[in-house]
Image (tube, rainbow, N blue to C red):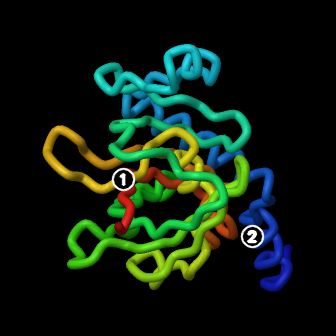
Amino acid sequence: MLSVMALAMTVACDNYETYGDKKKKERNAIAEFLADSAINVIQESAFNERGQVTDVSKNEYVYLTKSGVYMQIVRKGCGTMLEEDKRVNLLVRYTEYNILDKYNQTSDLYQREPDKMYVSRTGSTYTASFVSGVMYSSYGASVPSGWLVPLQYVRLGRQSDSANGIARVRLIVPHTQGHSYASSNVYPCFYEITYQREK
């Protein structure tokens, strides 16, 4: 008969999850989310051939191989692309949903002030830090890499009228492109984000 200590160790071993196990759970959670949300995944080649747009009416998301991010561009935005060798302040509104555990995690939609971050571009490399807001208070200054992926494809400006809306995207971000909590706990998040230049 197993001693109490041996039994406890056996249970602990049975419950231990390797990094590989966690990555498999993440992949399965993303696949389930794609199916449940009736998302139509298109490849980068088709995305690029169409001028880097996704058809929202067909619920299209492009799978970006390099980052592993799924992206839907709801609006390309007004203004211009982020210029090279320039640092700008962006105001963002967002919602965050934990895909693995299936709950709304954080959001700044009901806050008086949007989240604020600065971002700069050098060639095809984007760097950014949060200055204030819910993401800053929840996870620190580091901006998830997945949040920077859309900046290659959208225009950043300020909304001047109802016909010229600011950039808006939806993202499925794997843990490797997420914030520190997602990265360390191996879970993916769904985001809806708008980007606007501060001035």
Q: Could you tell me which secondary element the residue under label 1 belongs to?
A: loop
One can see residue 176 in this view: no
Q: Position of residue 87 (x, y in %)?
A: 57, 67
* Residue name at image x 45 percent, y 51 percent: 190
**In this picture, is 119 found above or below 31?**
below
In the image, residue 130 above or below residue 39: below
Q: Nearer the viewer, mark 1 or mark 2?
A: 1
Name the residue tied to disc 1.
157
Whether 189 is drawn above or below 79: the answer is: below
Q: Amino acid at mark 1?
A: Gly
Q: Position of residue 174 (x, y in %)?
A: 62, 50
Mark 2 is on which residue type?
Val
* Badge 2: residue crowd in 10 Å (few <14, some 14–19, many ≥20): few
Position of residue 146 measured from the top left corner of the image (x, y, whole percent)? 59, 53
The local crowd at label 1, few if under 14, some if 14 to 19, many if 20 or more residues have their Cα within 10 Å, is: many
Q: Residue at x 71, y 56 (%)?
A: 122
Q: Name the residue at 80% across, 51% down.
A: 20
Marker disc for residue 64: none
Tell which circle, 1 or 2, labels the residue nearer the N-terminal end. Answer: 2
| Vertical arrangement, residue 91 with respect to residue 62, above or below | below
Instruction: Please state the horizontal and vertical placement of residue 29, each as a whole percent of the image.
Output: 55, 44
Q: How many marks?
A: 2
Front one among 3 and 83: 83
187 vs 72, nearest the viewer:
72
Q: Which residue is mark 2?
A: 11
> Front-most of 77 and 59?
77
Left/right of residue 149 with respect to residue 115 in the rendered view: right
User: Image quadrant of residue 111?
Assistant: bottom left
